[in-house]
Amino acid sequence: MKSTGKPLVVVVMSGSAIALNWAKQNANAILQAWYPGEEGGTAIAQTLDGTNNPSGRLPITLYTGIDQLPEFTDYSMARRTYRYFDGQPLYPFGHGLSYTTFAYSGLKVPATVAAGEPVQVEAQVANTGSRDADEVVQVYLTFPKRPGVPRRALRGFTRVHLKAGEQRTVQFTLGDRDLSHVSPDGMHLVSAGRYGISVGGGQPETGAPVVTGAFDIRGERTLPR
């Protein structure tokens, strides 16, 4: 079918990550349909013909190959899940496309908070395309350098419907659990230091539209189990 020169769409029906390297290099589009059930054919057709404007996001990481994964007998968290993976995946956790485009701006976070205080987050999301659509706004944190901390972690998300050209304010409140990480001895800690934050349509540094900032936490707090 590729050799015909006609546009090629690959529809994937799977339950987890599979090798899609050829499809990424050769297909015009990839639709991840999972196991869609008896109305799956209708849903796929409506998505491909544009009746439905997709807004799904990957709940897993799609790797380029098993060489990016740790050995089966390695029980550490290194390179496991998007939180500790430091390579370049085929498609990252949180990735998803739409028939329109979005832009982010106006990130507001406090400069400093004390450990135990919530962090109020606000940003503007705009539909910059020509079609009405849903957007899944995601909040990711990066943490101060401590043993066991992830590279980044998803700490909030919300779905918003935006008409073409519409802009809206989205707000999040990050509490103790959102701001914490797990120490090597299993304790949930809110550590002192500088935190990075991004609000957008996917992970930062993956090509997704995001707006980024930072804040500091004073003091430390150990959370109850």
Image (spheres, rainbow, N blue to C red):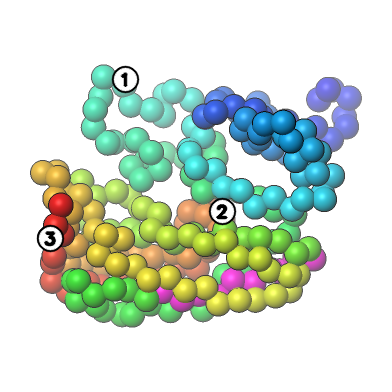
- Asked whether 197 falls inside the magenta stretch, the response is no
Residue at x 68% of width, y 69% of height: 162
Q: Amino acid at mark 1?
A: Phe
- Asked whether 129 falls inside the magenta stretch, the response is yes
Report the magenta stretch's main SS: strand
The location of residue 115, given as percent across then percent down, is 18, 71
Front tag of 2 and 3: 3
Q: Is residue 9 visible?
A: no
Instruction: Residue under label 2, please give it.
Output: 207
In terms of secondary structure, where does tag 2 sit? loop
Could you give the CA–CA distance between mark 1 and mark 3, rounded to whole angstroms? Answer: 33 Å
Q: Which label belongs to residue 222?
A: 3
Front tag of 1 and 3: 3
The location of residue 161, given as percent across then percent down, is 66, 66
Does label 2 or label 3 sit earlier along the sequence? Answer: 2
Magenta region, residue range: 121-130
The location of residue 10, given as percent across then percent down, is 73, 31
Instruction: Residue under label 1, please give it.
Output: 72
Say if 105 sits above or below 94 in the image: below
Q: Is residue 106 visible?
A: yes
* 225 to the left or right of 16: left
Could you give the CA–CA distance between mark 2 and mark 3, rounded to whole angstroms? Answer: 35 Å
Residue at x 33% of width, y 80% of height: 110
